Amino acid sequence: MSFSPASRRTALAVFAAAALGLGGGVAASAVPSASAAPAAPQSVEAAGLQASPGELWKRTELYFGTTKPGGGELTDAEFTAFTDKVVTPRFPDGFTELTGRGQWRGSDGVISREKSKVIVVVYPFSDRDANREIEEIRTAYKAAFAQESVLRTDSVEKVSF
């Protein structure tokens, strides 16, 4: 059986609508019955829930590879020396260091698997120096250990101490 291009487009559109639930149908459970009274809205407190404490802060994660270009791997002592010299002076109120394993594809197309270090920093929006300091950390690590990159992710988190 052969279909014209218009028929193929129509069949594709019908299939997509059905797959995405765009057919206009409504589930029976979603239709209120005549005897059902509308539910009264409840406040968070009335429902027995409480808003979580805290305020919005920025969160930055930096991912550091530890494989050295000439071979070998950065030691924990070398990474600690780096954080003591470069990270702590910029974020003396604290940060978290995590150790993991990861992989990434370098600019040469080769997939590398290596031990990695992650530094997590949370800081208030009012910290106007944080972005510059984070970029200084990334630049210093790449220069000190001949790294191609240091991954940075940023998000907003609700923080309470």
Image (cartoon, rainbow, N blue to C red):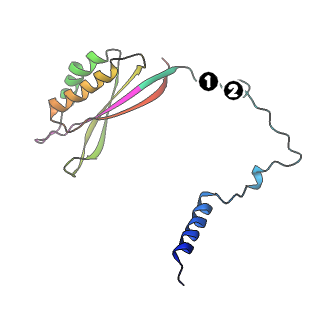
**From mark 1 to mark 2, how far is it between C-alphas?**
8 Å
Dot 1 alpha-carbon crowd within 10 angstroms: few under 14, some 14 to 19, many 20 or more:
few
- In the image, residue 17 above or below residue 126: below
- The part of the image, by quadrant, that contains residue 101 is top left
Q: Residue at x 85, y 40 (%)?
A: 37
Instruction: Point out residue 158 in the picture as x, y percentages from the top left corner.
Output: 50, 25
Q: In the rendered view, does 124 fall on the left or right side of 144?
A: right
Local packing at callout 2 (Cα closer than 10 Å; few below 14, some 14-19, many 20+) is few
Residue 157 vs residue 117, the one in the foreground: 157
Specify the amino acid type for callout 1. Ala
Which residue is at the far left?
70
Residue found at the very far right of the displayed protein: 35
Q: Is residue 70 on the magenta stretch?
A: yes
Circle 2 — which element? loop
Residue 77 x/y as whole percent: 19, 27
Relative to 69, residue 16 above or below: below
Q: Where the N terminus falls, by quadrant?
A: bottom right
From which residue to which does the magenta span run? 59-73
Residue at disc 1, secondary structure: loop
Q: Which residue is mark 1?
A: 51
17 or 65, which is in the foreground? Answer: 17
**What residue sits right under mark 2 in the picture?**
44
Q: Is residue 45 left or right of residue 104?
A: right
**Amino acid at circle 2:** Val
Which residue sits at x=16%, y=30%?
143
Instruction: Tell me if label 1 and label 2 are in contact, CB under 8 Å.
Output: yes
Q: Position of residue 117 (x, y in %)?
A: 28, 33
